[in-house]
Image: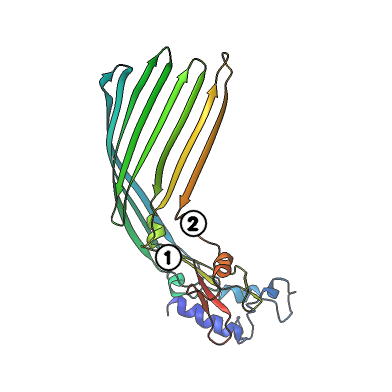
Amino acid sequence: IPLRDVISQNLINGVNCKLGPQGNQCFNPFGNALFAAPGTPQYNSPSVFSQLEAPITNIAASSLTSLDAVVSGEPISVAAGPVGMAVGVQIRTNTAKEDYDPLEVAGVLAVNPIVYNFEGSDTTYSYFGEVRVPVLKGPHGKLEVSASGRFETDQYTSAFNPKFSATYRFDWIALLGSWGTSFVAPSVFQRIGDYGQGLLPVSDPLTATVVQPAIFTVGSPSLTPEKSTAMSGGIKLTPIKNFALSLTYWNMDFKNLLTTLTSQAEVNANPNGPDIIRDPTTHQITQILI
């Protein structure tokens, strides 16, 4: 008989007080069993637990393989000095895999919902370039500007992100500024992975109760990259040797932030949403998808 079937039957027998060496002991699944004294009806004896416990083995593996090639140098010069250039390519492959224990896949564990094995990979191709140009060099100071760009594409999406910066130095004063965009693509786990947990209290605003539903974190292939726009500007003063004073302003704006809401935040946002599974009779929350 498969172990999962044995444990399932033992859970039923325990609730019906037919567990233990003599088949006459009860299993109390409620929290008051933790505080009950031996010999009381609420107490769970070690012999009962021995028939409900099982070793759990989950096997997870992930890998990241990267191949980079970069060419850089100063191929030309202008009046203010040499022009620096760099171009490159990168190929990244990310894999993720998890084989959950058969008991977890079957959903017979008391503290976890059903989970599913997953395996996947994603290969990203990236092309980038940068140029640094000295614009001014002389008695009026030194001005240098740079521009760079990076294009990335994988099986889900693609994006181009530029960046521009400038630095002006005159005597012991330096002015700096930059503007650019960036993005972070969802990982393989965030797209196809899953994870289950339970026994986390959640306050339900519709029923005014606190429940402990199964919580299932599941990835989505439709996730879009996290994007940001950043700009900065500042001044650096070095009036004497070994002393510097700087003031910098940063501004960063994020869109499509890649994060996981807590189970309570998911309920608060939309108590009747499609990710909140309720019992059709009692309307109590039985599962939360996040």
Q: Seen in the image, is 149 located left or right of residue 59?
A: left
Q: Position of residue 133 (x, y in %)?
A: 33, 25
Q: Report the side of 36 relative to 201 (left or right).
A: right
Q: Farthest top residue?
A: 139
Residue 94 in picture, x, y percent from top left: 34, 51
Quadrant in the picture for the N terminus: bottom left
Instruction: Name above or below for residue 85 compared with residue 231.
Output: above
The residue shown at (37%, 27%) is 145
User: In this view, which residue lies farthest toward the left?
Assistant: 75
Camera-side residue of 252 and 152: 252
Quadrant of the rendered structure where residue 218 is?
bottom left
Q: Which mark is residue 147?
A: none
CB within 8 Å, label 1 to label 2: no
- Which of the colour schemes (rainbow, by chain, secondary structure, one colour) is used? rainbow
Dot label at residue 100 = 1
Instruction: Please give the label number shown on residue 259.
Output: 2
Cα–Cα span, label 1 and label 2? 23 Å
Mark 1: give few (<14), some (14-19) or many (20+) Cα within 10 Å. Answer: some
The image shows residue 129 at horizontal and vertical percentages of: 29, 35
Identify which amino acid the numbered label 1 is placed on: Tyr
